[in-house]
Amino acid sequence: MATTVTTAQHVGPFAEAAAVPRRPRRRNIGRGLTVLLFMAPWILGFLGLVLYPMLSSLYFSFTKYSLLEDPIWIGTQNYSFMFTKDPFFWLAFRNTVWIILVGVPLRVMFGIFTAWLLTLPRAGSKTYRTLYFLPTMAPPAAAALAFVLIFNPGFGPINQILQSFGMKNPPLWFYGPNSSKWGLAILGLWGVGDAMIIFLAGLLDVPRHLYEAADIEGATGRQKFRFVTLPMISPVIFFSLVIGVIYGFQLFTQAYVASLAATGSTVNDAASNLGAPQGSLLFYSIYLFQQGFQDFRMGYASALAWILFLITMLCTLVIIRGSRRWVHYQGGGGFR
Amino acid sequence: MRRWVGVLATFALLAAACTTGGGDDAPSVIDTGGDASHEPVVLEIWGAWTGRELEQFNKIFDGFTEQYPWITVESKGGVGDPKILAAINSGTAPDVVLSFTLDSVGQFCESGAWQDLNPYIEQSDFDVSQFPPSVEAYTSFADSRCAFPFLTDAYGLYYNTDMFDEAGISEPPTTLTELQEDAKKLTEFNGDGSIKRAGFVPWLGYYEFSIPNLANIFGATWYNDDVTESAVATDPLWKAAFEWQHEFIADVYGDGDFQTGADRLERFVAGAGDEFSTAHDMYTERIAMNLDGEWRTAFIADEEPNLPYSTAPFPLPDDQADEYGRGQIGGTIIGMPKGSPHPAEAWLLLQFMATDTDTLVYMANNVRNVPTTLEALESPDLDVTPQFQTFLDIFEDPNSHYKEPSAIGASDQNIVQAFASRWEVGKQTDLDAGLADAAQQIDDQLAQAAI
């Protein structure tokens, strides 16, 4: 049997709201338009600069599109070619996964370590913080070039130092396929200032009384770090991890510059030397760039971009889902 | 319904009337006679020149404006192919374009992004025999001649004459066997077995020693006749080229053992000086011989003028010794993009740039590239040193050529390079399988491009 609910029948928390007389419809529309007007710059920007390009690239990913001719619909052929006939896709994917699996944890650990060091000095801490943060300010291309020179096996100071310590065959760094990615990882550690600064904030934010309580319980330094510090800064670690993975998938400038500089290539002959030495520095974003802007395969590059987007999103979701087990928020909140 | 048809027809007519020249329109004749009156026209040319070379390049248009006073040329430098293609795509193309990426000719011609110049050539009775025959191969594809050459590069052998004298070598090598023998005499090792001075470095990626150059030395073909299948696995010259590389490395650097030689050479190459600086290995005497382009003569004059060196065509396989004198050629190209706003005037500029002897000689003398017409090659105003003359001769050699263009740009080179990178360090040992795999990948790319 249908029940007729009148305003007078509302009870509980809704009663007051229900009792408020409704605004005139015209006034509501006017208010909505005002809100829309204020949001218009963002909405227009989103529609024109995000949604439209994304939808366009999604469409292009199902076409043969060279920038030179109109797109031709080819269904899923770009995707099937990518997974079944393109060894460079897998090479770029493997290299990218390597730098994420090795580079991101290294950066997180080094960032925590550096931040912890910076909590120690009682005097001049601001100077140290500035010094450690400075490398982050260096343009990535310039930093990569400098690293290629510093790590040059022939005349770079690093290998000369290693040789002076008796190492007979020091690594070839950016010039050898087995060591080039390690060179990039070290470059990432050098520019750890951005991660370090948020770890520092996290470390300084750990309540002192927790350490005092641990002291009373007789906890060792290692136990305090394991059971107090790490849980308390776990939201920062989680943030660094997510950002690191996303940036890892998008790694471009440093690898591109290092690869070209190490092979002595100009931008004009970059096409045939991309990813050198021996494809070890061919990362996903570089391959995508090469396909789109050097080989003019915009449709295929769009497909690569969408796969990159999906993989990045999947990885981020996995990390977020997994974070429920190890990330602790002081207020009990977090990702759900 | 009839009313709508009428509206559509009117719209179509208006659209046709409003369309500017260019695109697929038939070329219009332009009267260049002295009494003809001409509306002022501003032509835009986009290209990749930058810095000092751009300044020198921009000066050539004074001569053009002198010849065609009603046309002004605005040159925009530092513009690469992607930007040019984006402009073509959006209907804002310049009148004339210039590109350094010879490997894209196939894509430019086939897609029509660069217009076929054949109708213009026919209408103007333009004499294409002004260019050496080898030029056509790298400026045309799929029955479309969409580019003209504007200077070119030629590759040959540079060698240190003092080192040759010390080693008792009187003549540059003309065959690969001689190259190997000379390299062995010229190579020196350190006490720990590492290479102190390399006679010649056949390492892909070492300066200009690239896959296209290696293929060119052996005369290996990239495709079948109609460019539908890769010839990398079927042309035996590819196999010969890679086997020669292994044998050379084993003999000269590895005491007969390839892996030893490859390990030594990899470490040696890693310490190479920058190609475009005074640290170049030729200057620092780390190497005795090198494969390089003609522009190196200008760099040496500028950066290391006292270097005792000479040049020669690059040695060839013993069974091809009768073709000695040829080499890889190919360089800057110019063309008319689709949608060029002033095609008739653009055609005048293209002809001027491609064939005006004074212009080509001026550019050749300043940027030290090879001029691209037969007349310019013989010009008495050309500033020719004995070392530079070698490259003029290589360019004129009828057997000199660039790799065949294709619809997949530089992808074929990337694929073979990827295989070669594994091969030259000893990671890939099955040559036949590696070449077959590379050929299959190229065929896959061709199939994808042909959709």
Image (cartoon, coloured by chain):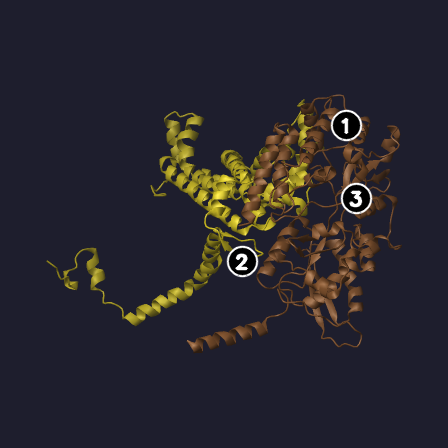
Front-most of B82 and B113? B113
- Among the chains, which one is brown? B
Query: Which residue is painted at 43% across and 61% down in the image?
Result: A43
The residue singled out by tag 2 in the image is A70
Front-most of A265 and B284? A265
**Label 2 lies in what chain?**
A
Neighbourhood count class around disc 3 (C-alpha, 10 Å): few under 14, some 14–19, many 20 upward: some
- Among the chains, which one is yellow? A
Neighbourhood count class around disc 2 (C-alpha, 10 Å): few under 14, some 14–19, many 20 upward: few
Q: Position of residue A115 (x, y in %)?
A: 51, 37
Q: In this view, does B254 lie above or below B294?
A: above
Q: Earlier in the sequence, mark 3 or mark 1?
A: 1
The residue singled out by tag 1 in the image is B196
Which element type, helix, strand or loop, lies under badge 1? strand
* Labels 3 and 1 within one chain: yes
How many angstroms separate mark 3 from mark 2 (CA)? 42 Å
Left or right, A11 with respect to B325, comes to: left
Neighbourhood count class around disc 1 (C-alpha, 10 Å): few under 14, some 14–19, many 20 upward: some
Q: Where is residue B410 in the image (x, y as percent from the top left)?
A: 63, 45
Left or right, B59 with respect to A180, comes to: right
The amino acid pointed to by label 2 is Asp
Q: Residue B296 carries which label?
A: 3
The amino acid pointed to by label 3 is Arg
